[in-house]
Amino acid sequence: MNVMQRSEFALINELKKIFQSAENVFLGPGDDCAVYRSGKSGKELITVDTILDGTHFDSNKHSPENIGYKAIASAVSDIYAMGGLPSVCVVSCILPQSISLEYVLEVARGMARAAELNAVPVVGGDVTTWNGQQAYSVTVTGYPILEEPIRRHTAQVGDTVFVTGSLGGSILGRHLNIASKRNFIIGLLEEVTPTSMIDISDGLLQDAAHLIENRDIGIEIIADKIPIDKDAATLGKTTGRNPIDHALGDGEDFELLFTVTPGEERKVELAKIDESIHLIGTIVDEPGIFIVSSGERKKVSPRGYDHFRQ
Amino acid sequence: MNVMQRSEFALINELKKIFQSAENVFLGPGDDCAVYRSGKSGKELITVDTILDGTHFDSNKHSPENIGYKAIASAVSDIYAMGGLPSVCVVSCILPQSISLEYVLEVARGMARAAELNAVPVVGGDVTTWNGQQAYSVTVTGYPILEEPIRRHTAQVGDTVFVTGSLGGSILGRHLNIASKRNFIIGLLEEVTPTSMIDISDGLLQDAAHLIENRDIGIEIIADKIPIDKDAATLGKTTGRNPIDHALGDGEDFELLFTVTPGEERKVELAKIDESIHLIGTIVDEPGIFIVSSGERKKVSPRGYDHFRQ
């Protein structure tokens, strides 16, 4: 059955069975708006993230469950990157007219899995169909864990730079199975207040460039300290590129890049977290991104680590 | 210049010039999330609405400014329908790869016009491009003006049914120029607390059906009281349908349908509002939608006023 052959009401009822409610939700799907309570009164966070068929996923290759999972998991990543926890999310599903109800419910199940892992109830959404491809747009609201959210443009010269997890080659599958950073951010902020933070969605170099964007500071990264994922090596075998190029340039890692005041590195080590954290560099007073490798220090373009090697 | 030939940073800077900030916004576009304060602590509203090229607008016919305006104005309508005021919104713009920067900025100007009329700052968004058509998904947050939001399923038997504005034929142009209901909802709620409310986006009959959905009540509408827009008559000349059919069935009116406790009709009249309000019927204890016309009372299907006439 085509998804739109059901009434909107029937579809919402099917979806309600899949999505769990939560304590902070007064009213879920089925009215003009959802009604919820944010985690704290005061400052609210909001972000939207969109994934497109053919760009961020491939409906010919990836399961609808995986696609739904990614739609929510990638959007909520921005909330953690502000030192926040998610409150609720709403999803916009843009679908081909021919899509089946079962396919949509599988997408919804993937969304529900990501929602549960991140403790972010799906409280509403809309489903529209057209003669185009699939796209999913997810808006997440949240609140800062500490008094203030952690911004991306607030690092100071001398700060130490950390990155979580491992980088590169996420296209081989990790980009679909984005791990929740919920426990990580709670554990980290119990020990230390980062001076800046950003999630790595465009690749380490590009997101490092965002940290120093429009400011008179730079970032120096020690090549040997970069946590290169084994996927970067696997991918390198087919691309012919060095694994570190993949670690520096590949997008969709969904790890966190953050800085702390010098002297607070020990607090990062003390944080009760499962993720690996890697000290990869320092904020410097010379504008630009610098990679230190084999005793050599070179300025690189956010898009150009290949340049550096040649 | 193609929109994606600029850096994201440059694009955001262009957009920042177009979108005004507001007192309740601590941090607008440019970080992982926007940061805002909701209007009241306590209950928050959230809704998402998506418009697609070829369905909700036609990029060959409609100006980018009009399209941007509609994207925001149609989404915020759901906040008013809950008796709420909007806090902030975020926009997801899905665009063809070939789209020009100037086109996108025109869309943004239309969004900014709707945002200003509704006092809802655009605090964030994302821009993605693909080899498909345009789509815009807008999420709006808000807060109830009164202690509680006004829901759609809470009318009681005996309540009086009102509708704002005029209905039918909005496709001739009104669907692009959705008037802000901000002052209306403020003025109405100063005088009276509706027992239920919904916005008319799917047509009067279908949205009337939503009011009584899954409940053991019905709605009786007096045909002569329905405010038929002159566009319904104009459209009827080309479709050959009766103007009242258009008023009952056409979507995208973006007017409000609401009920009040019997005896409170006078309060509705006293409300300091510019819009016309029309008393069109009553909530009854017999399930279904009934139209009373020329002394005849007939049950109709939400999709089937034509049936009734035949």
Image: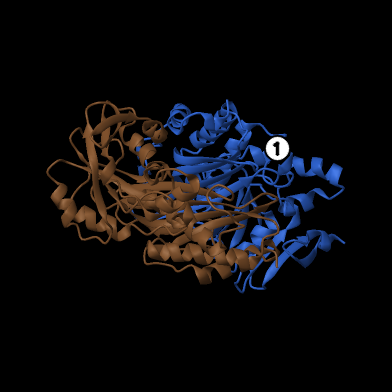
Chain colours: A brown, B blue
Mark 1 secondary-structure assignment? loop
Residue highlighted by disc 1: B173
- Asked if residue A196 shows in the view, the reply is yes
Tell me if B90 is positioned left or right of A147 in this view: right
- Examine the image and state in which quarter residue A275 appears: bottom left
Closer to us: B46 or B169: B46
Closer to us: A256 or B263: A256
Rendering coords of residue A286 (x, y %): 24, 26
Closer to us: B302 or B259: B302
Viewport quadrant of the N terminus of chain B: top right
- Examine the image and state in which quarter residue A26 appears: bottom left
- Asked if residue B282 shows in the view, the reply is no
- Examine the image and state in which quarter residue A157 appears: top left
**10 Å crowding of disc 1: few (<14), some (14-19), many (20+):** few
Name the subunit of mark 1: B
For the image, the number of numbered tags is 1
Relative height, residue A56 to residue B304 (above, below): above
Name the residue type under label 1.
Gly
Residue ID at (36%, 47%): A45
Rendering coords of residue B103 (x, y %): 60, 29
Residue ID at (58%, 36%): B68
